[in-house]
Each structure stands twice: as structure tokens, then as C-alpha cells.
Amino acid sequence: MKKSPPSNKSVKKKSGKGRSARKPWFWRLFWRVTLIGVVLLAGWMVYLDAVVTSRFEGRRFEVPSRVYARPLELYDGASVSAGNLQRELELAGFRKGDGVRPGTYRRNGGRFVISSRGFLFADGLEPRRRLALTVYGDRVQDFRVLEGENSPVVRLEPAQIGGIYPAHKEDRVLVQLEDVPELLTDALLAIEDRGFYDHHGVAPLSIARALLVNLQAGRVVQGGSTLTQQLVKNFYLTRDQTLVRKGNEALMSLLLELHYDKNDILETYLNEVYLGQAGTRSIHGFGLASQFYFGESIRDLDLHQVALLVAMVKGPSYYNPRRHPERALERRNLVIDVMADGGLVEGPQAAKARAQPLGVSERPSYSENRYPAYIDLVRRHLARDYKQEDLQSEGLRIFTTLNPGIQYAAEFAVEETLSRMDSGAKETSLEAAMVVTARDSGEVLALVGGRDSQFAGFNRAVDASRPIGSLIKPFIYLTALQQPDRYTLISPVEDKGFALVFDDDRRWEPKNYDNKERGDVPLHRALSHSYNLPAVRVGLDVGVDAVRDTLQAFGVTSPISQYPSMLLGSVSMTPVTVAQIYQGLATSGFNTPLRTIRQVTDSGGKALSRYNLEVDQVADPAAVHLVQYAMQETMQEGTGRSVYRTVPQQLSLAGKTGTTDDGRDAWFAGFSGDLLAVTWVGRDDNGPTTLTGATGALPVWSRFMGQVPQHGFSPVMPDGVSYHWVNPQRQALTREHCDNARLVPFMTGSEPVQEVSCSGNLERRIRGWFEGLFQ
């Protein structure tokens, strides 16, 4: 019997049972997936919350350390030329102007009117002042304070000469919200986020409103992202344009607004926003941007300057006012119009601002490290006391000893003199290094690491260790003169050839540079004329070890060869080390460690470290005085006498030339009453030259000394020294008007006992004088 097919009714009923059976299973799966999604989202939110709070509550920014030159002190009688004063003002970000607005100066010949900005030093705030002064004869005269607190001495804000930056090369000057002009924050919110104080991090209505404004303007005037979103994007996220990143941005913005006050978020944005590029260094925040583009503090900005900075938020490269002034001007004026339409400024005020030029300084006020060789030495000195990560992130302020005027003169002397010397062939071009210190304190005032002073590579002043040649001779004779019972300045020393034969049958025969021999010569003449044979004989007599001990006492820390060749300067030193040991000769036998840093403070001006003068008497000052006498003779009569072709004759100097075999290294080290300078000239490949210390290094040194206002060297006679008229050839006392008479210092008790008369000579001179009257 056939079964009849099921009716439609029964089929429908069965179908309904299937749907009913599947429904619980589907919703169970849906709710499980939803629950897992909620858990995952909650976990992700917890993670994002930790990311947001950990950085926002911790150290939000890695702020680089700022390195400053020494502050310029102005007062009646201050030593500065008009050209150097103008250079220092411009280096510190001053602009030519009316001399009334802070940060401007006016010059008419030697007459200056300067309006300072004020500066927070470790010992207190140097207030704003308006000054007037005249520079005449490289001296400040008629110094007056026109406005502000009166003072006989005024420190100008120091020039920032560089920084020690984080690995990511971000730079910023942190500002607090209360220090930022209200006009700037109002303009920023009007352009970037009008509803900032109303939304909770994400504002969908702002996106719609921005779209409408942009359509009405016919261009992009406003963005859709809130300031909070922009901050999250810059602060935490990459710039990848993906849905995941946009989702994270929205979530983190909500979390940021949940945890922190609106003003705190706004202040962080003001310090984080990217506003330009200076080489490899990125400019972040309105505080640094104000200085970078205008050379002014953010609190001193005018309306048109505020509008330009706000305009650049949208695209710092596209609206770069130095590269694209037309774009920047159009965008700035658009910002001014928006501010006027929003009632932030009055119509006439807006019209006046639109008529202003961009007003951007010709050069960035704070650029990459201006003096890379000097900053290199500063970093090495800082490494003794500070960790690298702290220097890169803690915003320390480092006040150095660099004198911009002296640095400029040193760079000019190196570059200009070498250009005249060099043949121009690339493979044979000369290089040079120079170190300049304050004679009495050991402060490093200038440092040149090569003929290209802006090159941040090999620093010859610090790292080029080269044989010093005859620069060693003053230390040989100092070692001998500390034995006054054996040596004085008029002691005869033998200028005659000899040979040393070593145990392995090697033979060493020193020779004079000119291959001549002169027999017995007075010690002072042997030093001033840089004879080799007497120096070696004296060095062997007092002992190579004793000469080595003298060098180490004056500050040499590297190993020194004990071979006799050391007495002709085979020992290698860097220019900085040579400056260190010659500092002792310039300061009467004190080991005076070189200093590049005066003080380190935190970002708020609190002193962290002070680097005061440290001295240690390591040699008899009486013996050093005798060496100084011979080094002055070097400049008047000896190997350094050509200096007075460039330097005024009345400027008393002391110094020493140095030359190594084949002229591979030309050295000069010397000092005036104010400055000590060391110069090296040679080739990086250690190739031979035709130069000597007198023809290679001395011209650079002379060119430098001739540019800088200073006093002559007038050594103070220490206890235990007396001057006597002597006849050096006869090693006897004599009288002033006798033949061969010379006034020579002696350590008391070491002067000659024998006296020679010259009465016959005097009678002949008088007779000749009278005969001359009647001829």
C-alpha cells in the first residue's frame, strides 16, 4: 500500500520545528563571540590605558641638554671690538631693529643700543634691560642702562651653541600653559579644535563641521581630528593610515580625556606638536619654534607671529616660511581671518597683522651644534660626571667657557692662513688644529678641530696625537734649571755632535735642524734658537726619567717613551694635551686642568655642578720664571721673531716653535698676558711638508693673536729670583752699558760671583760720542 505524500501543512510544521531548533544554538554562539570580543576589548583597553598613563604620568618628553657660550659681560672698560659685539649679539639671537623691543639692537658705527630679553642664571634672574654704550679702541665706553634695573655690569643672555640630543633628534623648549599667550591658545583652538573643552577626546560633530567650513572656504581650513587625537597620534602611535591605528587613536583619546585635565592635555600638545626641521634635528613645541623662527621668547610674540606658528601646525614643511614664504604668508593671513571672524581680534588689529611681513629671522636662532669640535670636548668633560642618557633627556643647561669672538678669530686664522699656504691639490691639502685658553685660569675659550670648522668628524684638537718636536725643550731646560747649583740661563751648553750606541749596536746621532754646530752657547740662547744638540745633552745630563716626570707633573697622562729620542720630541701629544702642559709654563708652574664647563643646572636653573679653578704647584716658580724669560727671548730674537710682522711690537709674548722630521708636524705654543694658544699644522696622511714651526704653525698663531684685543705678557717676579747685568760669554757680572751686557734673571744665589769691568769700553764710547758732536 502506497504512502501518500505529506501535506503542505505537515511540511510547514516540520520546517518551523527546524528553525526553532537552530535558534538557541545561533544565539549561544553569538553571545559567546560577543563575550569574547568584550573581554578582548576590555583587555586591550586595559593595555592601552597602561600605555597612556605610564608615559603621561612619567617623563613625557626627552628634553636635550642645552649648551651655552659664556655670557657676555658689558661694563665700562670691557674688552670687545665692535665687530665681535655685533657677532655675539646675532649669535645669541638678537636682531637689528630699534633697540627698544626685547631681543633687538641698533648700531651706528661704534654706538650700540641693546634691548636684552633677560635670562635665568643659576645665581638668579638677569632682568630685561635697555643699554647704550660705545665701543672705541676695542673697549666699552659710556656704558649706561637706559631702562630697567641699574647696574654697573650687565650680563647678556648667552648664545646657545649646541645641544646634546636624544637618539631620535627631537628638540623642544618646554613651556607651561600660563606662560603661553592666550592669543596663541585661542588661535590654535579656533583653527584645530573649536570644541576642545566640550568633547571627550573624539568629536564626530567636529568632523562634520570641519567638512562644512572647508567647503565654504574652498580649501582645507580645519581638520576633523581633535587636539587630543593629534596628541595621541604624535605621542604614542605611528603615522600608518590603517583602521586599526585609527581605532587605537580614538580609544586612547577617550582614555586620555578620562584620566587628565583638559589644560594638562593642551599644555602637553603645545610642547609636542612638530613645527619644523633643522638639519637632523626636529623642532617640537611652540616654545622652541618661537625661538627657531623669530629668535624671541614665546611670551613676546605679536599677532602676526602667533598666526604664522599656528598656521604651520597643518604642514610645517609645506608652509616653511624660509623655503615657501608665499604659501606661509597666505596660510598665516587665513588664520588671522579666522581669528577675526571668531571675534578673537578686532578688525583693525587683524588688518595691521595681515600687512606685516613674515618677520622670520634670516637664520634659525638655534641651529645644529655650531662648534662641533668644541662640543665634542665638552661632552668628554661631562662624561666624567653625567650619564649619556641623562644628558640626552633631562633638559640640563650647560654653561661653557667658549668665547664666541675668540672662536671666530681662531676659525678665521686657520682657514685663511691655510688657504694661502695650500697648493690646492686635494691629496696634499694641509690641515690644522688650534686650542685657545685663558692664560690664568685654563678655561678653553676656543677650539678648532680642522680647517673646516663646521665638520663634525675627526677632531684633530682632541684626537690627533702627533710628535711634538721642539715643544718639549722648555721642559728639558725647566728640569735642569730646578737645579740652580748646576744650571742657570747663562750656563754654557755644548752645541756639538755626538753619537749614542745602544746595546743592540743601534747608533743614534742627533743633529741640529740646520746641520751646523756652534760650540758652547748660553743656555738661554740654546732654548730661544731651538738648537737640538744642547737640548739632548742637557736632557741626558739631568736624566730622561726626570724630564718624563716633569711632563707628567704638568698633566701628561699617556705613556712617555724613555728613549733618548724623546728629548727631541718623539713623544706624541694632542693639541689639547700640549695646551695643558704649556698652561703650567704660563702660570708659574701650576698644573691647571683645562676646563670647558663653568656650571651645569637643571632645566629650572638650579645648580647641579660647579667646575671651579683647580691648581697644583708642580714646579719651582723661580725656575719657571727663567724659562718664561727664554721663551720671551724666542719671540724677540729667536725662532718666533717673525710674529711681529703681524702682531704689534709692543705686545710682549712668550712662545716656542716645534718641528718634526720632514716638516710632518709644525707646532707653535705661546701666550700673551691674557691668552694661551697652541697651533698644529700638518697632513692627515702624515706626509712630509716644506714647513717648520716658524713657517707653518706660527703664521696661523700670529694671525689669530693679531685679531684679538689683549694685554702683553708681563711675568710677575716670584720670590727667590733676582735680575743681574751679566756678560753671558764670560759668565760674569757686568754693568748695563758694557759690551755684551744682558739683564738676566737668576735664582737667588746662583748668579755669577766674578765681575768684569768695562771702564775702558765706557771711556771709548764717551770719547766717540764727543768726537761725533764736532764732526
Image (tube, grey):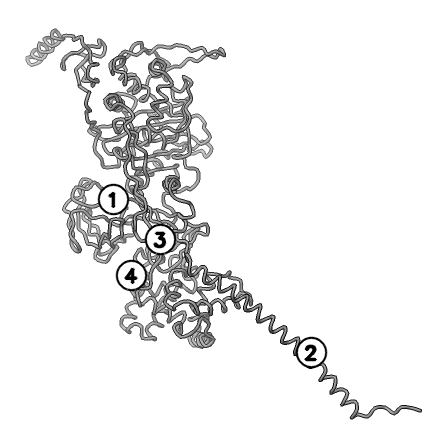
Give the structural element (helix, strand or loop) at label 4.
helix
Amino acid type at image mark 4 = Arg
Q: Position of residue 733 (x, y in %)?
A: 17, 11
Residue placed most toward the observer, 698 or 143 = 143
- Label placed on residue 364: 3
Q: CA distance from mark 4 to mark 1?
A: 30 Å
Confirm whether residue 250 shows in the render. yes
Q: Does residue 326 appear in the picture of this structure?
A: no
Task: Check disc 3 and report its element: helix, strand or loop.
Answer: loop
Alpha carbon distance from label 2 to label 1: 90 Å
Is residue 767 rendered to the left or right of residue 470? left
Provide the residue designation for mark 4: 299
Between marks 2 and 3, how big is the CA–CA gap? 70 Å
Disc nearest the viewer among 4 and 1: 4
Q: Earlier in the sequence, mark 2 or mark 1?
A: 2
Residue designated by label 1: 83
- Say which label, 2 or 4, has the lower sequence index: 2
Q: Quadrant of residue 271?
A: bottom left
